[in-house]
Image (cartoon, helix red, strand yellow):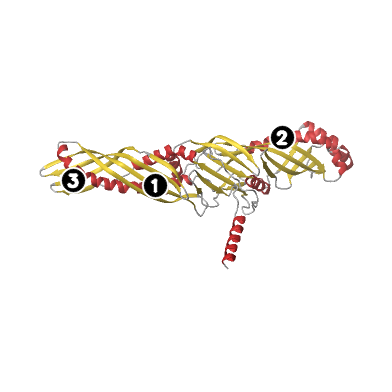
Amino acid sequence: MGLLQVSVIFLLSFITMTLAEPPGCKIRITDRGLEMLKAETKRFVEEELSNITMPEMRGEEGRFQYTIKDVKITELNLTSDLRFQPDVGLLFEVQNSSITLNFQRRILYWLFYDEGAINASAEGVDIFTVLHLNKDKEGRLKISNVDCNASIAKMRARFSGTLGRVYDFIGAFLTTGMRFVLNKQICPALNHAALVLVNQLLETIPVRAEVDNYVGIDYSLLNDPVVTETSLDMDFRGMFYDLKNENETLVNYAVNPIVREYDRMIYLALSEFFFDSGLFSYFKGGLFQMQIANERMPKDLEMLLRTTYLGTIMMLNPALIEHPLSLELEVTSPPRSTIKTSGASVAVKCNVKVLVLPPGKPAVQLSSMTMEGKFNAKVSMKGKRLAIHLDLRRFKIFSNQSALESLALIPLQGPLKTMLQISVVPLINNYTKRGVQIPLPDGLDFIEEVVEYHNGYIIVGANLHFRTGLREIIERKLSGETDNSI
């Protein structure tokens, strides 16, 4: 019975793994990428701690009555580290650091009254903060929890004023209270910074967003991020969809991209499904249709078409010979991408109609043929936008009516291919060069990227660059501004 149960559990686990949705997009941030974030994170934490506000303190000790107010942090000297916390998220640690404060005192001793400034320093400051990274219900990366411990080893105060030396002996009493209050303020400040402010930054990562007026893209996380000592790996759905029919999407049968590298700061892996879902969505949206006529029709091509179909025109109606010709191209099935180690390509099958356009009357069809084309696709990155450049490599046409007509179409092969290269492909590339944003937060860009082609997917390895600071990005998000550069 025990062996049977083990077998059933193993079988169910295998089925679950088999049925799990593979990602169309993967991102790996390495410890090198985290190293780049350290300085920016330290600056952000220092700004947050500098904004700590402390309540007015009142009390008495023997003959002394005191009031402490207007506490301000004037300087922070933090020795910090940022690293991955396996299976959890990120660890931000501060060790043996110091915080300098300034506050106003008011003290009454017997009949003597004095007030002035006190400069104090908190020494031996240690902060241990763990950020738990998870996928929320919308598929967004979030900091779900913060574990924080802070301690101050000692605090020193330097008094000024007429009774400065007299107060030295009660300095230990005052600094003990100050150390206690300051210590209690550190973790709440960091908790707010992570759970509120940094999560605002993570909300700038697109999850489900419009790409243009026709399609959108789904970058929702499929599961919680996988964190090791050297990397943070995230699996995104990476799927385009038709804005008019968001539920009609392509099923992902593509291979699961495998990222093995750690040399760059960040790696982006995209499977064939990522590109195929985009081609499928644009096809369903009706974008793969085009008419070439009048001024868009090259003169030499029009002349060749008239010569080729002169007999057909004369048989139909000789009066049509003076009217303009038109080519109508319509993709008949969703184009498919193929990614190999040698590069990427897109295969397209299209129906081409040759028509005469008599003014004020319905178009007259002269011929219908099938065109098959293969485009080489070059993938590139700029900032955090992924773009594709197409180049027509293979092209053939054949008649839908007869093999004999297919032979007659051979002279059209070269001119039609040239027409596509000169008139159609530049239009496509002008559109695709706009690119689509990859799932990165505002203010963070790819630089020095290298594209590698594998069987079934591509990998873009790159370094990261902060275009602006964390606080500036968060403040822009809170004010409702958008990053116009994406």
The answer to which of 282 and 83 lies nearer the viewer is 83
Say which mark, if any, is on residue 66: 3
Residue 61 position in % (x across, y down): 16, 48
Q: Which residue is mark 2?
A: 423
Q: Is residue 375 above or below residue 222?
A: above
Q: Residue furthest top?
A: 300
- Mark nearer the viewer, 2 or 3: 3
Q: Give the total of numbered labels.
A: 3
Residue 381 position in % (x across, y down): 58, 37
Q: Earlier in the sequence, mark 2 or mark 1?
A: 1
Which kind of residue does numbered mark 2 sit on? Ser
Q: Which residue is mark 1?
A: 129
The answer to which of 334 and 177 lies nearer the viewer is 177
Can I make out residue 21 in this image? Answer: yes
| Relative to 116, 296 lies left or right | right
Residue 162 position in % (x across, y down): 15, 36
Which kind of residue does numbered mark 3 sit on? Tyr
Secondary structure at numbered mark 2: helix
CA separation, marks 2 and 3? Answer: 84 Å
Task: Tell me, yes or no, whether the two marked residues, 2 and 3, touch with CB atoms within 8 Å.
Answer: no
Q: Residue furthest left?
A: 111
- Mark nearer the viewer, 2 or 1: 1
Residue 421 position in % (x across, y down): 72, 34
